Image (cartoon, rainbow, N blue to C red):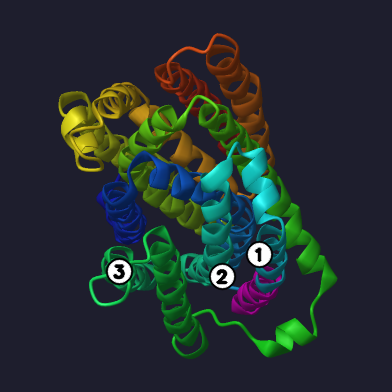
């Protein structure tokens, strides 16, 4: 039986996190709508391929990598009432974030054309995509640092401030999108206007959240801990972060390779898949939000050595995630064509038909994505990042990638088979995450 206290604490932490993720996803959706209505499937292919590559790197190394290590150690230190250790881990994580962000952005900026070429971009798509990607890399740096600071704040239960920053960034981004893409005040810049809007909005968001971290955060980054950095804590942080990086890397790289395969199926197939992914991404937000809550709450409860409540809070998170994502499943089943039509003109009949079928199939994976996200988050909060890595490696590289390669590249079938493959992948992923969590709590 889940107590009212557990439900309240879960909702207090998870709902702002769900809101934050939802706001960022809505930003992406409206951005895609404007780009699709401006330049059709060609513009969608340029932006879609570039952003897939850029945000795969952000998620692998920062969002699902370093940030997980920071959140787990800081939250467990808080649970053990060791504020000094919490601030040490936060300071080490912040410096590590800067170093990682600079390195990643340098590589992406320097080799953007070669990366896009490997992804299947050719001709005008390659030329314009290279320019778009080089501009957007600047925005990616600030986005990574926002992620790092947000992980520090979330680790002690502050999910409201990252949510407020997401609203600020989104409002600025979409306002500038409309002005710059369509040339409302400035010259018409098209997709390059979207890239410039990203840079400005992410920079402003970073300034605000950085000032909050310095002056108002309960857990602060201290210069003294950076200057007298203890290598044992650095090793612990990266010992937890590296498997998490590898986990998301296993998933994101396989997803990226699948994107490259789909790109070779033509711009219509790629654009249809991109639209369906964009629409479906809004449904991931409850899973992500409750997963964040599970990481934080389980970390704190493990720090307190209260394993019974750690399990109770995880189940409360799982229940909330499944309930909310099931609502989206019903929507995808009932009105896929209506949702797809928001992104392109009615003349794109084939694109609308394929994207609608993909979205319809995507409804069946919503509950299992919810369970996978929550139990993976709970495992990471408890300090186990290795099992989520092995599970993600197996489901991504032994199920998703080989089957998509076979159906799309070898048999040259419709991309709807990609979506049936992911339904199978998420089902197996959720079952394995649940089993690993149960075994870990039993051992504790």
Pointers 1 and 2 in contact (CB under 8 A)? Answer: yes
Q: For this rendering, which residue is in front, 283 or 194?
A: 194
> Alpha carbon of mark 2 to alpha carbon of mark 3: how far?
20 Å
Where residue 161 sits in the image (x, y, percent)?
Answer: 37, 73
Where is residue 220 drawn, in percent x and y? 56, 82
Magenta segment, which residues?
Answer: 83-97
| Residue 105 numbered mark, or none | 1
Which of the labelled discs sits on residue 404, or is there none? none
In the picture, the disc for residue 138 is 2
Residue 201 % position (x, y): 40, 73
**Badge 2 vs badge 3, beta-carbon distance below 8 Å:** no
Picture layout, residue 402 above or below residue 193: above
Judge whether residue 178 can be spotted in this image: yes
Q: Is residue 320 left or right of residue 381?
A: left
Q: Quadrant of residue 235?
A: bottom right
- Was residue 440 drawn as part of the magenta stretch in this picture? no
What secondary structure is marked by label 2?
helix
**3D distance between C-alphas at marks 3 and 1:** 25 Å
Camera-nearest label, 2 or 3: 2
Q: CA distance from mark 1 to mark 2?
A: 7 Å
Q: Earlier in the sequence, mark 2 or mark 3?
A: 2
**Residue at 60% across / 19% down in the picture?**
405
Most common secondary structure along the magenta stretch: helix
């Amino acid at each position: 039986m889940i107590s009212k206290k557990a439900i309240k604490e879960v909702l207090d932490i998870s709902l702002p996190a769900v809101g934050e993720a939802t706001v960022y996803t809505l930003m992406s959706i409206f951005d895609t709508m404007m780009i699709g209505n401006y330049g059709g499937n060609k513009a969608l292919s340029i932006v879609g391929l570039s952003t897939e590559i850029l945000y795969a790197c952000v998620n692998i190394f920062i969002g699902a990598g370093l940030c997980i290590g920071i959140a787990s150690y800081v939250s467990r230190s808080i649970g053990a009432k060791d504020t000094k250790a919490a601030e040490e881990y936060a300071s080490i994580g912040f410096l590590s974030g800067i170093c990682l962000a600079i390195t990643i952005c340098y590589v992406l900026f320097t080799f953007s054309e070669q990366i896009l070429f490997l992804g299947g971009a050719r001709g005008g798509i390659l030329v314009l995509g290279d320019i778009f990607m080089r501009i957007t890399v600047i925005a990616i740096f600030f986005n990574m640092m926002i992620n790092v600071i947000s992980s520090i704040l979330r680790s002690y239960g502050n999910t409201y401030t990252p949510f407020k920053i997401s609203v600020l960034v989104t409002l600025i981004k979409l306002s500038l999108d409309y002005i710059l893409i369509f040339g409302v005040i400035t010259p018409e810049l098209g997709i390059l206007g979207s890239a410039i809007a990203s840079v400005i909005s992410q920079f402003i968001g970073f300034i605000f959240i950085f000032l909050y971290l310095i002056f108002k955060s309960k857990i602060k980054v201290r210069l003294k801990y950076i200057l007298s950095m203890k290598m044992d804590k650095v090793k612990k942080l990266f010992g937890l972060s590296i498997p998490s990086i590898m986990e998301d890397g296993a998933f994101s790289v396989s997803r990226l390779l699948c994107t490259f395969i789909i790109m070779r199926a033509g711009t219509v197939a790629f654009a249809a898949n991109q639209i369906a992914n964009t629409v479906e991404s809004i449904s991931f937000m409850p899973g992500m939000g409750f997963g964040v809550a599970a990481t934080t709450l389980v970390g704190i409860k493990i720090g307190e050595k209260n394993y019974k409540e750690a399990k109770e809070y995880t189940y409360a998170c799982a229940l909330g995630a499944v309930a909310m994502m099931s609502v989206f499943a019903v929507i995808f089943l009932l009105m896929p064509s209506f949702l797809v039509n928001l992104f392109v003109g009615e003349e794109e009949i084939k694109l609308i038909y394929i994207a609608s079928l993909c979205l319809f199939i995507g409804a069946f994976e919503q509950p299992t994505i919810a369970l996978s996200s929550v139990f993976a988050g709970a495992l990471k909060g408890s300090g186990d990042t290795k099992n989520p890595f092995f599970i993600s490696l197996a489901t991504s590289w032994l199920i998703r990638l080989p089957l998509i390669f076979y159906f799309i590249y070898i048999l040259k079938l419709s991309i709807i088979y990609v979506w049936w493959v992911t339904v199978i992948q998420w089902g197996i992923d959720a079952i394995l995450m649940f089993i690993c969590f149960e075994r870990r709590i039993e051992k504790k």
